[in-house]
Image: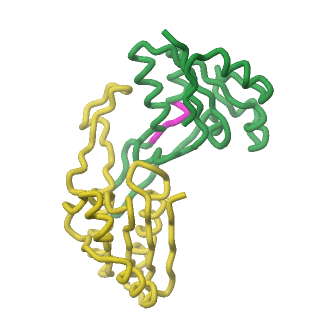
Chain colours: A green, B yellow
Amino acid sequence: MPKILNIVETAYRATIEEQDDTVLWLTHMLKNAGADICVLLRANAVNYAVRGQDASGLSFGENRMTHSPEIDKDVATMIEKGVAVYLVDEDAVERGLSEGELLNGIRKIKRRELPELLDQHEQVWHW
Amino acid sequence: MASEKTLTIAIMDAPYESANSTSALRIINAALEKGHNVNVFAYEGAVNLTMKAQQPHPNPVKGTSVEQEQHPTTKDWVASLFKLASTKDVKLDWVNCGLCVDERGAGDWIEGPRRGGPKDFLDASMASDATLVIPTK
């Protein structure tokens, strides 16, 4: 099974409507289907690794959204399933994210280490 | 109490593609709640926001059924906005760009929107207190 790296950089792309992130969802599905897959969060998507996110409370008129996206929980579940989730350390620092704000199990990686990470995967999908 | 203020808003994004759609609907909701009239020009992929055939789906990742997931559809959200406008006794004039509809085969939509074109957007904008454009980026 070839190793796949999903690179996610566009954050919160229609996550309210979809109730999740479409690429993380796809990663879940592919993992369930037996894929050897991991995720790299970069750019604004590093915020997906921040714990305690709350997108609840949306309503239009009388139509209330009862199931909001829980991106941090989705990422945590993915890690529990054995999906390695990497995060570009400098991207997190630039956005003021501290170590204590991040989910357990997130693997921080320096930009200079990215070529080596990419080289470890037969397929690199940059979303 | 309805006001004399009218907002025109142009949107371009297709549903389930970006946060722009949700942001636009939130702005429309807020304007209607405050008693303002709102004109919407749904351009390009935004004409799909009101398609009648949209259906919620289950989530195989979470193992939830259609009923448990309560997956939102933009056509239901827009329908709620029309209901809100009626409740507030203000006008929501939603124009789907006709050429955009034709090229997408997106002509079957919920009750409320009407077919129009760029001239409708221009006229609405000229007659409004403010115009907001939320383009696809």
Of A105 and A84, nearer the camera is A84
Q: Residue at x 43, y 58 (%)?
A: B13
Rendered location of residue B10, percent (x, y) = 44, 71
> Which image quadrant: the C terminus of chain B?
bottom right
Look at the picture and state if A18 lies above or below B94: above
Query: Is residue A59 at all visible to an observer of this figure?
Result: yes
For residue A100, what is the image quadrant? top right
Look at the picture and state if B72 lies above or below B97: above
Rendered location of residue B88, percent (x, y) = 32, 77
Look at the picture and state if A84 lies above or below A23: above
> Which image quadrant: the N terminus of chain B?
bottom left
Q: How many marks?
A: 0
For residue B102, what is the image quadrant? bottom left
Q: Residue at x 73, y 23 (%)?
A: A115
For residue B87, what is the image quadrant? bottom left
Task: Report if residue B79 lies within the magenta region.
Answer: no
The residue range painted magenta reads A69-73
Rendered location of residue B129, percent (x, y) = 49, 87
**Extreme-top residue of the structure:** A1
Q: Please, what is the dominant secondary structure of the magenta stretch?
A: helix
Q: Residue at x 45, y 74 (%)?
A: B9
Please indicate whether residue A80 sits to the left or right of residue B42 in the image.
right
Of A41 and A60, nearer the camera is A41
Query: Is residue A79 at all visible to an observer of this figure?
Result: no
Of B103 and B61, nearer the camera is B103
Q: Residue at x 73, y 37 (%)?
A: A92
